[in-house]
Image (cartoon, helix red, strand yellow):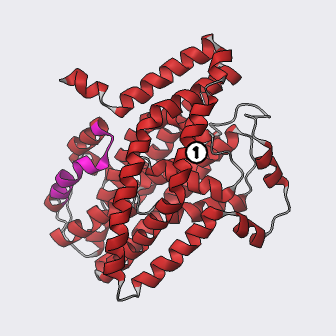
């Protein structure tokens, strides 16, 4: 029973593909280089979903935020808190990536295609940038439609229709993600065959930097927030250790949601606050995912030796503040968000996504654990701001 469960697990096949790709790339580099089409083909399939998913998730995310604000004072506080904390997470991911430089190989970095170089050196024009950038056009259109729907009397009818469409689009994406082992194999085999086994070093550095950044976020940023409300983060982590173990085993923060909600109520949070903040937090307050997204983009820029100005890094934060909302818990949504941000910047090759597949599964646990801790603390903070008798025993 256990063996059949492992064999049908996508993670197992991705890891097996990576191991085989490393062996092929190291021992038969000439053959390995020919597998490049597999990694590029997978990324091209992912690109098909960028437009519809970005449009649907942003429109539904904005209308969801509008509904949350209409829930009253608690909903408004939750919206403000989610935006502030996830912005901190995005900035921290960029900051740590720039300090520790996990993607830095050498001065040249991995080679990038000529069309990216031409774009990078071209004279910048906002109008030209918007005209040539389909992702930004979709992004702006989605924001306008979302804001319109929040104030429209047809909001529920239209969002219901869009939700059904999103459901089927995400089902299609789920089936495409079954090809992830082939994408991971092609991307890794080509990289090892072309640039050598040393290519694995940046991926190891990325994992260490990512785990370190998330630990710093939890204990410094969230710890400071807890201290302000006279709560102890270590007591909280001890109180939810069973939920953290569940998340660690399943790589999904949603798996511990019912148990977390029950414990938060036991700590003194009212049912209304818990019922509103925790479920919506799984779409709008993904601290671990935010750190991963911003750090992954800087990592790829370093890998290809693409210089990003502070202005461009600020643009990354602004884009991710919008695109990272509403696609939580959906298989492949992280890659869509990364792909949409990279295409908006139009400086970093999308082929790097296949490279990230190699370590994505190893970092999913850290993302999920940070997400659940962040949502638990968000609930405690909103409860304390409502003068509820919160006590962590």
Most foreground residue, 336 or 74: 336
User: Could you say which quadrant of the image residue 76 lies in?
Assistant: bottom left
The residue identified by callout 1 is 44
* Residue 253 painted magenta: yes
Tell me where the magenta segment starts and ends, as one range: 250-264
Inspect this view and state whether residue 78 appears.
Answer: no
Residue ID at (66%, 20%) = 193
Q: Is residue 252 above or below residue 384?
A: above
Q: Is residue 172 above or below residue 365?
A: below
Q: Is residue 193 above or below residue 257?
A: above
Most foreground residue, 70 or 388: 70
Residue ID at (46%, 31%) = 181
Q: Is residue 149 left or right of residue 160?
A: right
Q: Is residue 98 left or right of residue 274?
A: right
**Where residue 13 sits in the image (x, y, percent)?**
40, 27
Residue ID at (62%, 20%) = 32
């Amino acid at each position: 029973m256990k063996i059949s469960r492992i064999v049908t697990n996508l993670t197992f096949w991705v890891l097996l593909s990576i191991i085989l790709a490393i062996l092929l790339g190291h021992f038969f580099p000439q053959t390995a280089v020919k597998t490049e089409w597999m990694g590029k083909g997978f990324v091209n399939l992912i690109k098909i979903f960028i437009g519809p998913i970005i449009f649907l998730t942003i429109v539904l995310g904005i209308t969801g935020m509008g509904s949350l604000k209409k829930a009253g004072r608690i909903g408004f506080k939750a919206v403000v808190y989610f935006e502030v904390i996830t912005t901190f997470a995005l900035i921290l991911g960029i900051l740590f990536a720039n300090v520790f430089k996990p993607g830095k190989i050498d001065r040249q970095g991995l080679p990038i295609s000529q069309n990216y170089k031409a774009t990078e050196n071209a004279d910048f024009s906002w109008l030209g940038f918007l005209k040539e950038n389909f992702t930004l056009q979709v992004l702006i259109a989605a924001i306008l439609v979302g804001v319109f729907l929040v104030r429209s009397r047809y909001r529920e009818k239209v969002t219901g229709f869009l939700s059904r469409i999103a459901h089927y689009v995400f089902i299609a994406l789920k089936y495409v993600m079954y090809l992830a082992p082939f994408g991971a194999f092609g991307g890794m085999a080509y990289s090892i065959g072309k640039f050598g086994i040393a290519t694995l070093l940046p991926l190891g550095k990325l994992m260490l930097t990512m785990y370190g950044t998330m630990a710093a976020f939890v204990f410094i940023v969230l710890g400071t927030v807890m201290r302000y409300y006279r709560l102890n983060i270590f007591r909280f982590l001890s109180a939810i250790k069973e939920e953290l173990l569940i998340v660690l085993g399943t790589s999904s923060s949603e798996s511990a949601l019912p148990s977390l909600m029950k414990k938060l109520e036991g700590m003194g949070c009212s049912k209304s606050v818990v019922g509103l903040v925790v479920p919506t937090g799984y779409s709008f307050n993904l601290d671990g995912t935010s750190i991963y997204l911003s750090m992954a983009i800087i990592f790829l820029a370093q890998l290809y030796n693409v210089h990003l100005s502070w202005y461009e890094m600020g643009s990354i934060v602004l884009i991710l503040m919008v695109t990272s909302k509403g696609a939580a818990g959906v298989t492949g949504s992280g890659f869509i968000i990364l792909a949409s941000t990279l295409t908006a910047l139009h400086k970093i090759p999308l082929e790097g996504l296949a490279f990230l597949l190699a370590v994505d599964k190893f970092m999913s646990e850290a993302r999920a654990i940070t997400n659940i801790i962040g949502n638990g603390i968000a609930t405690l903070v909103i409860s304390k701001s409502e003068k509820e008798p919160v006590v962590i025993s």
